[in-house]
Amino acid sequence: MIRAPATVPKNDLPSFAGRVSARVALAPYTWFRVGGEAEILYAPQDTDALAGALRIWAGPVLPIGVGSNLLVRDGGIEGLVVRLGRGFAGIAIEGETIRAGAAVPDAKLAQAAQRAGLAGLEFYRGVPGTVGGAVRMNAGCHGTETCDRLIEATVVLRDGTVQTLSNDALGFAYRHCDLPEDAILVEAVFRGTPDKPDAIANRMADLMTAREEAQPVREKTGGSTFRNPPGESAWKLIDNAGCRGLRFGGAQVSEKHCNFLINHGDATAADLETLGETVRERVMAASGHDLHWEIRRVGQA
């Protein structure tokens, strides 16, 4: 099996089907715009290529999407970082179901459903990221979660096995499913409910207006930082602990919505993670609640 050395020579890359690059800066691939390098960044051309690569690659594997919910630490990521591209960005309407590749942006999925007159996926218009991340994180907002609309998902497991799993088999919980970290989602099928496209469009517009008013959507941020504890709102706990506007280095707790961390342009991943941990400590001291990160933190410090 192929295993890359700690520092991969650019002329000694594995010959996987697709685009393979060594020592790629990951900051441009994340919404925070921070983080170190990927040892190897791999964009497979299709599911068969991905499965074949995983069967012969012996090192660690980490799938990433568009980086909307991701904090890559400054030391970068060892092993194979997989980022799905055009071969995983198709959408097909099949009656009342929608089949979408894992690289489809959530907003594009919502818009495709609207044009087809299928309701129930409007919430995705306000969810940053892609279908793959939405399934893995059971993403949701405004009272609807991914598990409420997902029928099944196709994944490539670490050994290269391709499986299609039902909703029940994915073990959904709040902002969680039971897939292993190195399993890679490649496609998902959702069920919509017939409705008038204009009515769906109006609901989506209302959702986007509310999001624009409440969240720092034009900042370098990673979305909601912490999961809501049972019966509580993370932002209220953070606010009550006096953390609104709190800064560390180039990182700040948003004044607009204090469950968002912001990179003001010169933050490091360490700044953002340190600020987040400081918020957790202050919330614990003020309320006894242990906040859990919703943002995925990956790589070496």
Image (spheres, helix red, strand yellow):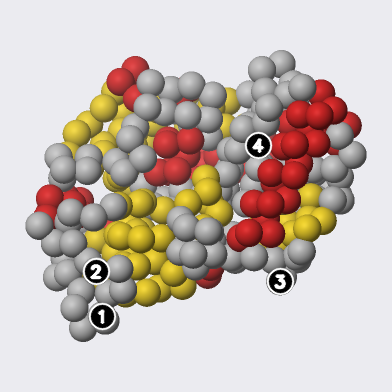
- Looking at the picture, which amino acid does disc 3 mark? Asp
Please tell me how crowded label 3 is: few (under 14), some (14-19), or many (20+) other residues with Cα within 10 Å: few
- Looking at the picture, which amino acid does disc 1 mark? Pro
Tally of numbered discs: 4
Q: Which residue is mark 2?
A: 5
Q: Which residue is mark 3?
A: 266
Q: Tell me which numbered mark, 2 or 4, is placed earlier along the sequence.
A: 2
- Dot 1 falls on a residue whose secondary structure is loop
Is there CB contact under 8 Å for labels 1 and 4? Answer: no
What distance separates the C-alpha of mark 3 from that of mark 2? 31 Å
Mark 2 or 4: in front is 2
Q: Which residue is mark 4?
A: 226
Q: Is residue 17 above or below residue 255?
A: below
Please tell me how crowded label 1 is: few (under 14), some (14-19), or many (20+) other residues with Cα within 10 Å: few
Q: Which residue is mark 1?
A: 9
Q: Tell me which numbered mark, 3 or 2, is placed earlier along the sequence.
A: 2
Whether residue 230 is visible here, answered yes or no, is: yes
Q: Is residue 69 left or right of residue 44?
A: right
- Looking at the picture, which amino acid does disc 4 mark? Phe
